Amino acid sequence: MALSRLGLLLLLIPLFVWSHARLPHGSGSPPAPEMARDWDQRSELLHGMLAGPVPGFWADAAILQLFNVFDAARYTKGELRRRWWRELAYLLHEALSLDPRFRDGLRLTEGLLGYEPGFTEEAVDMLEQFGPNVASGEYLLVASFLAHVELHQTERALHLAAMAADKPDVGSLAQGFAAKLLLQHHGCKAALAFLEYRKSRMPQAYADQLQSRIERMRKDPACQKEATHDNVRPAFTNGSEAGTPS
Amino acid sequence: MALMRFTFTEVFHHRAYQLMMLACLLLPWLMLVPMSLFLLDLGKVLADLLFTTEHMMLAGFVFFMALPLMARDIEQKVCHLLLSVPMSRSTYLLSRYLGMAAAMLPLTGLLLLSSAAAFVFVAYQWPDYTTLDLAWGVPLGEMLLLLPYLALLGALFLIVVLASGSSESMVFLFSVWLLSWSVPPVLEALMRPEVAAKMPHGLFVLVQALEYMLPDLSSARLSLDVAHAHWPAPEMLLAYACEHLSYAGIALILAMLRFERRDLA
């Protein structure tokens, strides 16, 4: 009896290890989204109910899930790519609606969503909505930059730059940017310098989106033409030079 | 007083309770692993993880230690042994409550000390991503999170004296806990002007009444404020403490009234 139990045990342990290794949770990547989820008032209510007394933890969990989604989204093409990015935007909405002061959520909104074609407006909306909740004005300043350079909404960019100028840490930078907009000295050089500055503030692993935007801008014939004619120093290389309209 | 000490000792000698104490010491340090995955708000993320740990620990204590002990007392007539000495039923319930509330203190105390030490370590290791203020702010926040569970313990006593057995008590307590978890965010959403305009007034009153009947477990705003190193105003803290303690008192008095008339034969 004892031997038969031991034999059965020796048979079942390899069977368990073999089957466990073949289950999908071993792969580590999330399943592809079958349909795009849009964030609305009902989603906000649902996640509020699920989070209960621990909204901060729920927001952290959304950001952790976002890292997995981004890993899949960055290498996907076509319609599936759009769905992945929709999912990423949903997770950012979830994190920021549960914890509106969560700086990681704001940083990822500007660094990832802001430079993905088709999602820039949504990123600017989110930065405009949640940016005033934190002490730093850098997110409002980025929203202003995105509104001007990507969306070509100068009035909105000015409004966001004015909001950012009220914050002590980026006041001079925001004013410099707003001044540039007003004086219409907002060529490619300033935009590239600004993007390089933002890239320097992102961890290397999450700077791909910014880098591809910089490369697209460098290849733009209008920018190449400007580079040959214009030797003006960029305004966004660092904080001390900011605010000096060229 | 003797029964209170006895209750505390009874709980303390459970192996599960001793494991929970060990977990309270170790978990704040284990939480440094998920915390290090984030970019900027490391202190805030650690605070969130610690508050969640405390919610899980205290809910585990109420559901898996306090509820079985009380249900066993009444269902298996163990309370007869204790009531045979000159002790009123109300004194019995009150002593049991105070003993169990006292048993929550070592758990919270260990979590609090370990959290403070973990925050001091994080503040020196990653000074740009957190503030040393959290080393005292988060332990104080953890002390405040104990109050909703004192209220839930009061609700547990009321449920146990009303229910017919342990299964029924578990179902009712779980329902109360689930509603307490999810009703406050719903109510908050219903209070927004754009939602309130579309909703029948009767439904609004119903949800509001439900919120008054349940213990307010949703210390969501307090947790978020403390995690972001914004300490709430003293009058808000006073109201928070009074709300939970008075809820626990009301539930306990109702339980005593019911228990006095209950047929224990």
Image (cartoon, grey):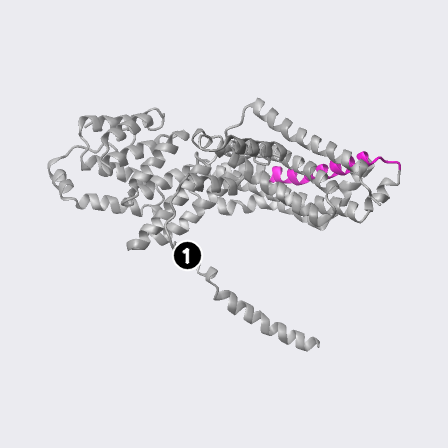
B183 sits left or right of A131 in the view? right
> Which residue matches tag 1?
A31
**Residue B101, magenta (yes or no):** yes
Work out whether residue B163 or residue B62 is closer to the camera in this orientation and state it: B163
Q: Magenta region: which residues?
A: B86-114
Report the residue at 39% width, 47% height from top: A37
Instruction: Mark yes or no: residue B92 visible.
Output: no
Work out whether residue A96 or residue B70 is closer to the camera in this orientation and state it: B70
Q: Mark 1 lies on which chain?
A: A
Report the residue at 74% width, 32% height from top: B253
A188 sits left or right of B240 in the view? left
| Quadrant in the rendering for residue A27 | bottom left
Residue A113, percent across and down?
33, 43
Report the residue at 54% width, 32% height from top: B202
Report the residue at 31% width, 34% height from top: A143
- Amino acid carrying mark 1 in the image: Pro
- At mark 1, the secondary structure is loop
Residue A232, percent across and down?
16, 32
Residue B78, percent across and down?
82, 46
A214 sits left or right of A206 in the view? left
Viewport quadrant of the N terminus of chain B: top right
| Quadrant in the rendering for residue B142 | top right
